């Protein structure tokens, strides 16, 4: 099946990330965080372990809403019917952070501080405007949870996290089918 036009209508995962990743990076810089790395967790290649404070994000899943919308329009310029199919989606990402805490640096921000500020960034009016301009809306941002794990030094480390859900439309456009002739038959019943 050949696509007539695909353009920027698909809203692929990487396109979503390209919209919200600069928002997070710029917001953290604006709030005065220096040297914080923001990366996708569970990448397809080994990246090594960041040595400084790091914010991770990864996709949790997609949820389709309602039914597939289908409609046809006539392109008089190219003399062709265009068939469009649209599906409303909600995609949820999780954000967590790592920042080593030490009794020697009691004024250092924590992983929870990072996550709470990213949570704040994702709910801000500036974020909503940028997302809106990219035909995305932020549907919900959950509460921050603060789990713990035992690190490689047998110390407890916090790994706070929250989820955010983006709403958008995925669209596919195909050449439509056109009736080019009709045959009329009148039959007795």
Image: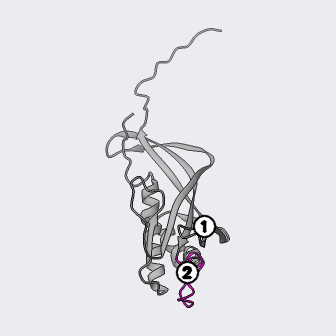
In the picture provided, is 73 more to the left or to the right than 111?
Answer: left
Residue 164, magenta (yes or no): no
Q: Single out the residue that lies furthest toward the front.
A: 154
**Where residue 49 sits in the image (x, y, percent)?**
43, 66
Q: Is residue 110 above or below residue 164?
A: below
Q: Single out the residue that lies furthest toward the left.
A: 78
Q: Is residue 132 above or below residue 12?
A: below
Q: Please, what secondary structure does the residue beneath circle 2 have?
A: loop
In the picture provided, is 170 more to the left or to the right than 181?
Answer: right
Name the residue rendered at 41%, 40% in the picture: 174
In the picture provided, is 96 more to the left or to the right than 146?
Answer: left
Q: Main secondary structure of the magenta part?
A: loop
- Magenta-tinted stretch: 99-116
Is 17 in front, or is 138? Answer: 17
Q: Mark 1 highlights which residue?
A: 150
Name the residue rendered at 39%, 57% in the picture: 46
Q: Mark 2 highlights which residue?
A: 101
């Amino acid at each position: 099946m050949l696509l007539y036009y695909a353009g920027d209508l698909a809203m692929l995962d990487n396109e979503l990330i390209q919209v919200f990743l600069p928002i997070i990076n710029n917001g953290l810089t604006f709030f005065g965080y220096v040297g914080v790395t923001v990366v996708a967790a569970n990448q397809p290649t080994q990246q090594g372990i960041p040595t400084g404070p790091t914010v991770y994000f990864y996709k949790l899943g997609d949820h389709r809403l309602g039914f597939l919308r289908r409609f046809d329009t006539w392109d008089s310029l190219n003399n062709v019917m265009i068939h469009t199919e649209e599906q409303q989606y909600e995609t949820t990402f999780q954000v967590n952070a790592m920042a080593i805490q030490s009794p020697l640096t009691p004024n250092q921000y924590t992983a929870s501080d990072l996550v709470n500020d990213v949570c704040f960034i994702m709910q801000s009016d500036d974020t909503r405007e940028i997302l809106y301009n990219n035909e995305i809306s932020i549907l919900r941002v959950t509460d921050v949870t603060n789990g713990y794990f035992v690190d490689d030094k047998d110390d407890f480390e916090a790994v706070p996290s929250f989820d955010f859900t983006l709403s958008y439309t995925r669209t596919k456009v195909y050449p439509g089918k056109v009736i080019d002739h009709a045959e009329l038959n009148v039959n007795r019943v």
